[in-house]
Image: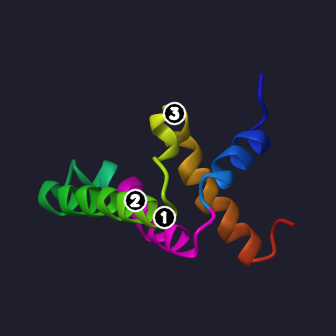
Amino acid sequence: MASVGSWLDRYKADHNHPMNHATHIVGIPAIVISLPLFFFYPYWALGLFVGGWILQFVGHAFEGNRPSFMKDPRFLLIGPLFIVDKIARVLRLKR
């Protein structure tokens, strides 16, 4: 069984381009926030969800590769952890 760290390493290997990082930093939180928002504001949630996914695919166009989840759907859970990891590094909560 692979560790979370090894999954993050595999995810990071597919996300090297700075534009891909930028689109993921905005797009992934938009997608995650949209999920519970569907119960209260479905139109806003739909906009966030679709906009977030558009950003993901734009980022991968810059990167020149397919999104990781197309190789393995478990990467849909690793993407949000990637963002949490980046924030933790910026805040120096993790090395």
Q: Relative to 80, say whether 22 is above or below.
A: below
Q: Quadrant of the C terminus?
A: bottom right
Residue linked to disc 1: 24
Provide the secondary structure element on which disc 1 rests.
helix
* Cα distance between the residues tagged 2 and 3: 15 Å
* Cα distance between the residues tagged 2 and 1: 6 Å
Crowding at dot 3, Cα within 10 Å, few <14 / some 14-19 / many 20+, comes out as few
Residue 61 on image: x %, y % = 41, 62
Tag 3: amino acid = Lys
Tag 1: amino acid = His
Helix, strand or loop: magenta stretch:
helix
* Cα distance between the residues tagged 1 and 3: 18 Å
Lower position in the chain sequence, tag 1 or tag 3: 1
Residue linked to disc 3: 71
Q: Magenta segment range?
A: 16-33
Residue 42 on image: x %, y % = 15, 54
Q: Quadrant of the N terminus?
A: top right
The furthest residue to the front: 64
Left or right relative to 94: residue 86 = left
Give the mark count: 3
Provide the secondary structure element on which disc 2 rests.
helix
Q: Quadrant of residue 77?
A: top right
Pick the residue in front: 81 or 10: 10
Q: Quadrant of residue 28?
A: bottom left
Of the two numbered discs 1 and 3 in the rendering, the one whose residue sits closer to the viewer: 3
Residue 59 on image: x %, y % = 44, 65
Tag 2: amino acid = Gln
For residue 56, which numbered disc appears in the image?
2
Q: Are marks 2 and 3 in contact (CB under 8 Å)?
A: no
Q: Are marks 2 and 1 in contact (CB under 8 Å)?
A: yes
